């Protein structure tokens, strides 16, 4: 999964914030337009620095479970299948969080719109949906249940 950006630019955002700040600060100075132009220039500069730092440091966001094997044995419970699929994170969850994840998976698996051909395909899709944030999704499900 690659990092995607929307159409907004930090350069234009910085220039806009600089313009707004310059207009407000300009009312309290003797050189109104000079203050506005300096503020826009500073805002644009901050936006350029932000854009350059983003381009230098960007790395694609990857699913940590993308190539992890899924072992499904006949007779495994849903909890055992999910514990295997999310081995490292599953141990850190409380019993309530595990129950919430199981309910979320069951709801996803039984969704008629998705129509997964196999349980393994369903688990892979669930891992893609959760994206390495099992605890976060468990907490969201628990809040939803309240």
Image (cartoon, grey):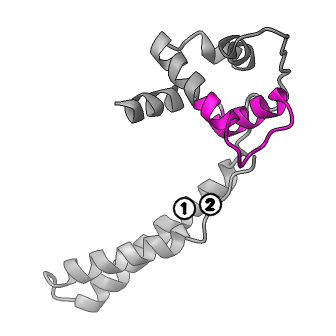
The residue lying toward the viewer, choosing from 108 and 91, is 108
Indicate the quadrant where residue 27 lies: bottom left
Q: Is residue 83 above or below residue 22?
A: above
* Drawn side of residue 120 relative to residue 14, left or right: right
Q: Does residue 59 belong to the magenta stretch?
A: no
Which residue is painted at 74% across and 50% down in the image? Answer: 2
**Distance CA(mark 1)–CA(mark 2):** 5 Å
Q: Does residue 115 belong to the magenta stretch?
A: yes
Which residue is painted at 83% across and 15% down in the image? Answer: 72
Q: Is residue 142 above or below residue 24?
A: above
Percent of width and height locating residue 42: 41, 72
Indicate the quadrant where residue 37 lies: bottom left
Percent of width and height locating residue 38: 36, 79
What secondary structure characterizes most of the magenta part? helix
Quadrant holding the C terminus: top left
Magenta extent:
104-131
Secondary structure at numbered mark 1: helix
- CB-based contact (under 8 Å), mark 1 and mark 2: yes
Residue marked by disc 2:
52
* Drawn side of residue 21 relative to residue 77, left or right: left
């Amino acid at each position: 999964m690659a990092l995607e950006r929307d159409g907004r630019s930090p350069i234009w955002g910085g220039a806009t914030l600089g313009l707004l700040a310059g207009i407000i600060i300009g009312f309290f100075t003797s050189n109104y337009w000079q203050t506005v132009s300096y503020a826009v220039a500073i805002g644009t500069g901050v936006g350029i620095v932000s854009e350059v730092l983003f381009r230098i440091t960007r790395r694609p966001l990857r699913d940590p479970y993308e190539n992890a094997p899924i072992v499904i044995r006949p007779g495994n419970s849903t909890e055992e299948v999910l514990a295997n699929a999310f081995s490292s994170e599953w141990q850190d969850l409380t019993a309530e969080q595990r129950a919430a994840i199981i309910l979320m998976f069951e709801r996803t698996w039984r969704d008629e719109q998705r129509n997964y051909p196999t349980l393994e395909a369903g688990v892979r899709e669930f891992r893609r949906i959760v994206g390495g944030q099992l605890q976060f999704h468990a907490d969201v499900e628990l809040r939803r249940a309240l």
